[in-house]
Image: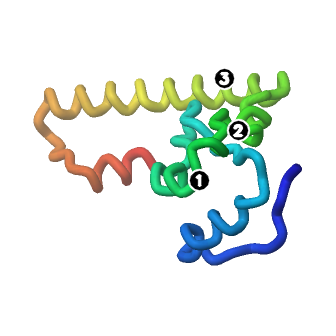
Amino acid sequence: TLLVDRVRHYENVFNDLPVSTKNVDSVLLPSNYAYSGGVSFAIYETIPAVKRQTSPSPLILLKETKKAIEVAGMKNAHMKDAVALSDFLSLLQEQMHEGKVQWDELKVVHTLD
């Protein structure tokens, strides 16, 4: 059963967690998965070991499921990024070889914008 009774201030999490979880059998703690680092070690240690259940967050798993149109859009975006990066690297190599242009981080940013 999901227990969310109010929004709490983050600063109070270490005091609130033991109180909030004392009458439950287990607490789901998100584990490391894909781009999510999972629950912090400090929060993990706040929950008694007998109550800890670690698993990838159900929310992360829902986000990873993509519709066909989303997959196609991602592939298209990756292709456009690859072409832009290749064009830029070619320009950079050419201009550095010629020695006519001084490159720095700002020049790169302005060129890519």
Of residues 26 and 106, the one nearer the viewer is 26
Q: Earlier in the sequence, mark 3 or mark 1?
A: 1
Of residues 100 and 9, the one nearer the viewer is 9
Horizontal side, residue 42 vs residue 49: left or right: left
Q: Which image quadrant is residue 12 in?
A: bottom right
Where is mark 1, residue-wise? 47
Of residues 62 and 92, the one nearer the viewer is 62
Which residue is at 68% across, 68% downward? 19
What is the number of the mark on residue 98? none
Horizontal side, residue 95 vs residue 54: left or right: left
Q: Earlier in the sequence, mark 2 or mark 1?
A: 1
Measuring from the top left, give residue 98's x and y in whole percent. 14, 30
From the viewer's perspective, is residue 30 above or below residue 9? Answer: above
Q: Mark 1: few, some, or many residues within 10 Å (few <14, many ≥20)?
A: some
Which residue is at 58% across, 29% downward? 80
Marks 3, 2: nearer the viewer? 2
Measuring from the top left, give residue 86's x and y in whole percent. 41, 24
Where is mark 3, residue-wise? 75
Where is mark 2, residue-wise? 60
Marks 3, 1: nearer the viewer? 1
